[in-house]
Image (tube, rainbow, N blue to C red):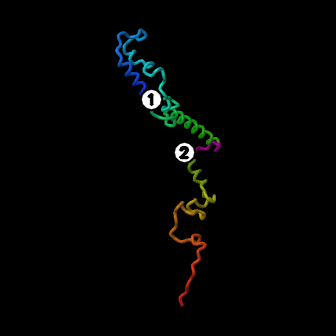
């Protein structure tokens, strides 16, 4: 893009720097002659490697495109509406409150390590704690293999 802009400036200087006694007949005004994009850019189109590939505008990339965001929001609304209909049909047409789906998710919670529904991972007997952390109380596993002689005083 920088090369394209610099080339346009160089061509502009060449056009503006020359004296013209008579303008070519294909130009209806002086402004058309001096600002002819064909002459300034040598017939090339501006590179579009820095613009959005969805809408073609400069200033954002594809992932941040407002057109994509609008279509995604519309699709999500349709999916939600369809999901509500399916859910109501699967439950036998019962009336539902909006918070019911959160309550069902809480009922399905279980320990990630052992799969028990009685506790969560942090309370699991198989859980060793966060990585890199050590406990302040000595455990039997940390002293395995090291035997200290016991001396008795007489």
In the rendered image, the vertical position of residue 154 relative to residue 73, given as above or below: below
Numbered disc total: 2
Task: Please give the name of the residue rendered at 37% of the width and 16% of the height, measured from the top-left corner.
Answer: 31
Q: Residue at x 54, y 47 (%)?
A: 99
Q: Residues within 10 Å of mark 1 (few under 14, many from 20)?
A: few
Disc nearest the viewer among 1 and 2: 1
On the image, the x and y values in percent for residue 3 come to 44, 29
Residue 42 spot, x, y in % from top left: 46, 21
Dominant secondary structure (helix, strand or loop) of the stretch shown in magenta: loop
* Mark identifier at residue 108: none
Q: Secondary structure at mark 2?
A: loop
In this rendering, position of residue 92 left or right of residue 67: right
Residue 83 part of the magenta-drawn span: no
Q: CA distance from mark 1 to mark 2?
A: 57 Å
In the rendered image, the quadrant that contains the C terminus is bottom right
Tell me where the magenta segment starts and ends, as one range. Answer: 90-96
Mark seen at residue 3: 1
Which quarter of the picture shows residue 124?
A: bottom right
At mark 1, the secondary structure is helix
Is 143 placed above or below 39 here?
below
Q: Position of residue 58 (x, y in %)?
A: 46, 31
């Amino acid at each position: 893009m920088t090369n394209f802009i610099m080339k346009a400036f160089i061509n502009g200087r060449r056009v503006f720097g020359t004296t013209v006694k008579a303008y070519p007949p294909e130009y209806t005004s002086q402004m058309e002659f001096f600002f002819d994009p064909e002459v300034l850019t040598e017939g090339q189109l501006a590179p579009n490697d820095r613009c959005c590939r969805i809408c073609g505008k400069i200033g954002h990339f594809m992932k941040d495109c407002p057109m994509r965001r609008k279509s995604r929001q519309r699709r999500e609304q349709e999916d939600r509406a369809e999901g509500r209909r399916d859910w109501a049909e699967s439950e036998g047409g019962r009336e539902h409150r909006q918070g019911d789906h959160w309550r069902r998710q809480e009922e399905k919670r279980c320990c990630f390590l052992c799969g028990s529904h009685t506790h969560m991972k942090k309370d699991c007997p198989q859980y060793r704690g966060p990585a890199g952390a050590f406990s302040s109380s000595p455990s039997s596993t940390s002293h395995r293999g090291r035997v200290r002689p016991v001396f008795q005083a007489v």
